[in-house]
Image (cartoon, grey):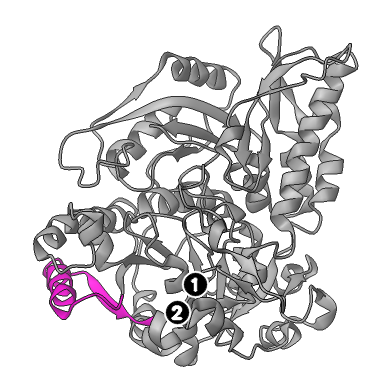
């Protein structure tokens, strides 16, 4: 059966029952139908004095184009912990419509380990991302309206971009204001995908509605002729934007196919954004369960780095253990196997590709000082020889491994890793950050590039140099950096999979996100508005005469 058929053939519990299982009363939720709801802001306040549960971060090896199953693994682990009578909750990101209609498909897990209702979650869900899109574009319209009616603030340059939650490369650079009206000022504009927008980052990094409004007001939207910054609060935009986001800031509650509670909230990409679910959702989950399973997008060089160096700093959190997801196909992919032959047994490429896995392990264990276990996500085409090869190589280095068969067996296929995690979280660890906030911007970038990516050096364009100088003059040098680069390689070249030779990281642009509180560093040919593949997944998505959706996977 397909993922969508498995989900439909599973009897879900009413969301009131799921909420009650973690101590949330019906009056503290806002239902969106029978199987999903919003959790009110008061729930955290009612539970804030409880001791936090254990936080388990799920990250991964550098992925192949279709991903390695981090969400599937996260769900399997949460279900596996429930199978051994541990109180667990998932804290996951929301899917974006871009990948759903693009190449990766949905982001609700697969096989017998899914969160549900999967069609709703993958499509409009509770409208969070739509609300962020509208809030973002309200600010754009207020900026251009202000300029139209006299430009009292003296905009010389607008840096705020519009957004859309779809992959549309045609919108990367557009001319606007071409109607020919007397006072309208034509200018060039750009679109980001919503999940790479500063609004998404702000919602995910805000602590409450007051903090949200402050961050919205601090958004840098442009510069005047003197080069002085102009902020959203100077347009009095933060109040209206917060109104549009009043529900989006509340976490969403759903369930797995085995009825494990799942708080799904916020969805920034990790290759072009900071890659973690909301602080509000994670902190709430920690008060409601003994074990919280959360994920960080793409490989550990991207999602985990940003989770640790950005989110953990801002939220005063630290994971008690890290699960590093690997697949046989990904290891072979980074060992140079041709895509067409990735399903064939090939221990030579497997051995070469282990260097990618080793580097991620070293980063998490030795650079960050965390407890690490490798979760091998089993695929049907994996051979016993290949699986044993990976096991032996990791044993030689003293690294724990668990073979997880969640896709096929559900929580039962994750009992081994669940037991190992329970033991692992009791071991001591000492979270260390890769850089100090007091260091200058270039030092932070270089430390991530050399320590985490394994690069030799960092090269900057003249424009990037000027942007760094301007940001530091404005007094923002103490912010963390959020490096946007390809997810397929430690380098900034998506074709350099093996990373055997010396390489540099090439910084082409710098963007100050004063509201969110970090600096985006654009490396390589990364785009903040992705495009669709030649044959997008949208071509196979349909709805039949009975209202049943097909084609989402």
Separation of marks 2 and 1 at Cα, in angstroms? 9 Å
- Residue 341 coordinates in the image, percent (x, y): 20, 61
Q: Is residue 505 left or right of residue 19?
A: left
Is the residue marked by circle 2 packed among few (<14), some (14-19), or many (20+) residues within 10 Å? many
**Magenta region includes residue 498:** no
Picture layout, residue 384 above or below residue 493? below
Using the rendered image of the protein, determine whether residue 511 is visible from the camera's viewpoint: yes
Q: Is residue 236 left or right of residue 301?
A: right
Is the residue marked by circle 1 packed among few (<14), some (14-19), or many (20+) residues within 10 Å? many
Q: Tag 1, which secondary structure?
A: strand
Residue at 58 percent across and 34 percent down: it is 170
- Callout in the foreground (2, 1): 1
- Residue 436 coordinates in the image, percent (x, y): 43, 38
Q: Is residue 105 left or right of residue 65?
A: right
Using the rendered image of the protein, determine whether residue 158 is visible from the camera's viewpoint: no
**Magenta region includes residue 385:** yes
Q: How many marks?
A: 2
Q: Is residue 36 left or right of residue 277?
A: right
Q: Which residues are magenta?
A: 378-406
Residue at the spot of label 1 = 109
Sequence-wise, the earlier of marks 2 and 1 is 2
Q: Residue furthest top?
A: 226
- Residue 226 coordinates in the image, percent (x, y): 69, 7
Residue 462, labelled with which disc?
A: none
Residue at 85 percent across and 79 percent down: it is 27
- Residue 523 coordinates in the image, percent (x, y): 41, 32
Residue at the spot of label 2 = 76
Dots 2, 1 in contact, CB < 8 A: yes
Picture layout, residue 273 above or below residue 4? above
């Amino acid at each position: 059966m397909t993922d969508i058929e498995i989900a439909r053939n599973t009897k879900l519990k009413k969301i009131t029952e799921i909420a009650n299982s973690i101590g949330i009363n019906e009056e503290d939720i806002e239902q969106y139908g029978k199987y999903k709801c919003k959790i009110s802001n008061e729930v955290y306040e009612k539970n804030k004095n409880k001791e936090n549960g254990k936080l388990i971060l799920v990250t991964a090896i550098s992925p192949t184009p279709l991903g390695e199953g981090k969400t599937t693994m996260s769900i399997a682990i949460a279900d596996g912990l429930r199978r051994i009578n541990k109180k667990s909750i998932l804290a996951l990101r929301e899917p974006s419509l871009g990948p759903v209609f693009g190449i990766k498909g949905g982001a609700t897990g697969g096989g017998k380990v899914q969160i549900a209702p999967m069609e709703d979650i993958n499509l409009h869900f509770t409208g969070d991302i739509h609300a962020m899109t509208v809030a973002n574009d309200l600010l754009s319209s207020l900026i251009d309206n202000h300029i139209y009616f006299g430009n009292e603030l003296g905009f010389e340059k607008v840096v705020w971009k519009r957004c859309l939650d779809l992959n549309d490369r045609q919108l990367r650079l557009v001319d606007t204001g071409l109607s020919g009206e007397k006072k309208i000022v034509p200018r060039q504009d750009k679109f980001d995908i919503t999940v790479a927008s500063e609004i998404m980052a702000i919602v995910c990094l805000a602590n409450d509605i007051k903090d949200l409004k402050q961050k919205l007001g601090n958004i840098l939207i442009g510069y005047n002729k003197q080069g002085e910054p102009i902020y959203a609060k100077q347009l009095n935009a933060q109040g209206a934007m917060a109104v549009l986001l009043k529900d989006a800031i509340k976490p969403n509650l759903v369930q797995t196919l085995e009825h494990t509670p799942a708080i799904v909230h916020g969805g920034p990409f990790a290759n072009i954004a900071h890659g973690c679910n909301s602080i509000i959702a994670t902190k709430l989950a920690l008060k409601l369960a003994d074990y919280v399973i959360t994920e960080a997008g793409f490989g550990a060089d991207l999602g985990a780095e940003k989770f640790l160096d950005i989110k953990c700093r801002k939220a005063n959190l630290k994971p008690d253990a890290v699960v590093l997801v690997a697949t046989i196909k990904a290891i072979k992919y980074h060992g140079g196997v041709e895509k067409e032959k990735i399903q064939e047994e090939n221990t030579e490429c497997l051995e070469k590709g282990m260097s990618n896995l080793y580097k991620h392990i070293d980063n998490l264990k030795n650079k960050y000082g965390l407890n690490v276990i490798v979760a091998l996500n089993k695929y049907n085409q994996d051979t016993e020889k290949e699986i044993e090869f990976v096991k032996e190589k990791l044993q030689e280095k003293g690294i724990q491994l668990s073979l997880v068969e969640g896709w096929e067996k559900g929580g039962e296929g994750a009992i081994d890793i669940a037991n190992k995690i329970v033991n692992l979280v009791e071991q001591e660890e000492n979270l260390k950050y890769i850089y100090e906030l007091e260091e200058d911007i270039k030092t932070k970038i270089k430390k991530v590039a050399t320590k985490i990516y394994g690069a030799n050096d960092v090269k900057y364009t003249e424009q990037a140099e000027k942007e760094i100088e301007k940001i530091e003059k404005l007094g923002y040098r103490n912010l963390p950096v959020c490096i946007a680069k390809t997810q397929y390689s430690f380098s900034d070249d998506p074709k350099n999979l093996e990373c055997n030779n010396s390489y540099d990281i090439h910084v082409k642009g710098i963007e100050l996100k004063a509201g969110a509180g970090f600096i985006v560093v654009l490396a390589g040919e990364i785009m903040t508005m992705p495009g669709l593949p030649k044959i997008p997944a949208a071509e196979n998505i349909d709805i039949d005469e009975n209202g049943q959706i097909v084609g989402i996977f």
